[in-house]
Image: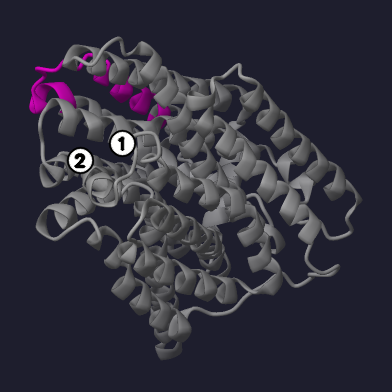
Amino acid sequence: MSDSNTTQRHWAVTVVVVCLAQFMVILDATITNVALPSIQSDLHFSASDLQWVVNVYMLVFGGFLLLGGRAGDIFGRRRLFLIGISLFTFASLLDGLATSPAFLVAARALQGLGAALVSPAALSIITTTVPEGPDRAKALGAFAAISGGGGAVGLLLGGLLTDALSWEWVFFVNVPVGLIALALALRFVPESKAEEARGGFDLVGAFLVTSGLVLLTYTIVKAESFGWGSGRTLGLGAASVALLVAFGAVQQRRAAPLVNLAIFRTRTLATANAATLLLMGGMNAFFYFSSLYFQQIQGYNALESGAAFIPMTVGIIAGSVISQKLIAQFGVKAVLLGGFALGAAGLAWMTMLTPDSSYITGFVPGIALLALGIGNAFVPLTLIATGGVDAEHQGLASGLFNTSQQIGGALGLAVLSTVATSATNGGSDNALVHGYTTAFAVGAALLVAAVAVIAVSLRSKEANASAAAAEGVEVEALVAA
């Protein structure tokens, strides 16, 4: 009994450590949003270049996730986790010490690379360390809550640190947290890797897929300034597609490919990634435009703007807790459909905002619906994204799932920024709000599209079986008859 308790405490600490690291990398995608005016003023960013403080992090994060996931399977998940935390912490220090726009953007790119090593390793460490059953379900639920709520917490924390100290502290805060996570990981996180890692590391495949994803994201981000139909945009888009097609061709010929393309035959994994891509496209744009609405229209300072997102954090955590009970009663597919529908309703509510809208009646109902929807969606998405995949490919599955989050966020923000700009006619408050609400409407459409994808592509039995595999329970016990 004593040995059992000791083992349980050991993996429980492991879960805390990996969730702490995941929290750092997720919140860093949004923590800078409310600090952007201060960063722009101090480092003299141009209006067009300021977006890269946010976008370069997501771009590099998303572009290197597959490499990070597969490298963890081959070289060891703990090893990649430690390297990632070290790199992320060092880059955070450089961020805070930045004295020019180029310095900060380069450091943010390095930070994104560290995040790309940490995030897939974190999820695969949980799925290969925590024993099957209710304990794994709780661990995955905590991980999903962190993944879904980290962005909202980042806005609050960013506002608090910027207002109380300075913008540099939105980066410096990661240094002590990273060092603590590193020390705990060295003590409590066990090593694991794929048992069969023959054929070495597919560097060619890694270069092609990473270059293709990074170039595709860059193309979408810059299309607003280049023009969607310009030769530069079309040329860059064609080049990114060519790289990804070449990657697929190379993978077909490799004995030990970076990405075993057969993994996409797993319907639950493919559906989870497609739905996540759409969800993050709407969610990240919501954070961005809501921050602008509060500061540019309502006149909030950084702290007030961050505090306005408290209901978002509470709602996501509540939704994550509720979802586990709903899954047991109604099944995975029903909870997913309900979560995305709630999220779409929340964004639709936001389309009614005006410059004079009240925070309580104009903003809170929408954010509550969106937060509960996201919380309900993230837990089952996490379960079905990894539950149907064997232990040998957990790192790859985790990398794919996290790639969908970051690429979806980067592409969604780029596309909806273009939509908002196109819908803004003039510089008045009414014109700006019209641009924001138009972006919210397109974001709601993305979530409705995710509902359609889930309804058509996901089969209830497969989804429940995948979630049961992730939790280590019998399928019959997952859904009440």
Location of residue 161 (image quadrant): bottom left
Measure how far apart labels 2 and 1 are at the Cα level: 9 Å
Is residue 396 in sight in this rendering?
yes
Overall secondary structure of the magenta section:
helix
Of residues 368 and 93, the one drawn nearer to the viewer in this rendering: 93
Image mark count:
2
Above or below, 167 against 413 in this view is below
Judge the density around disc 2: few (<14), some (14-19), many (≥20) Cα neighbours within 10 Å: many
Residue 309's disc is 2
The first of marks 2 and 1 along the sequence is: 1
| Disc 1 secondary structure class | helix
Secondary structure under tag 2 reads loop
Is the Cβ of the residue at disc 2 closer than 8 Å to that at disc 1? yes
Which image quadrant is residue 428 in? Answer: top left
Magenta range is: 339-363
Foreground pick, 367 / 480: 367
Q: Residue at x 57, y 38 (%)?
A: 217
Identify the residue at horizontal 54%, vertical 20% (top origin). 227
Left or right of 165 in this view: 207: right
Q: Is residue 90 magenta?
A: no
Q: Residues within 10 Å of mark 1 (few under 14, many from 20)?
A: some
Spot occupied by residue 67 in the image (x, y as percentages of width and height): 66, 58
Residue that label 1 marks? 287
Q: Is residue 322 left or right of residue 310?
A: right
In which quadrant is the N terminus drawn? Answer: bottom left
Residue at image coords 15%, 45%: 302
User: For residue 197, which numbered disc appears in the image?
Assistant: none
Q: Amino acid at mark 2?
A: Phe
Residue drawn at point x = 50 percent, y = 30 percent: 278
- Residue 378 location, x and y as percent? 43, 43
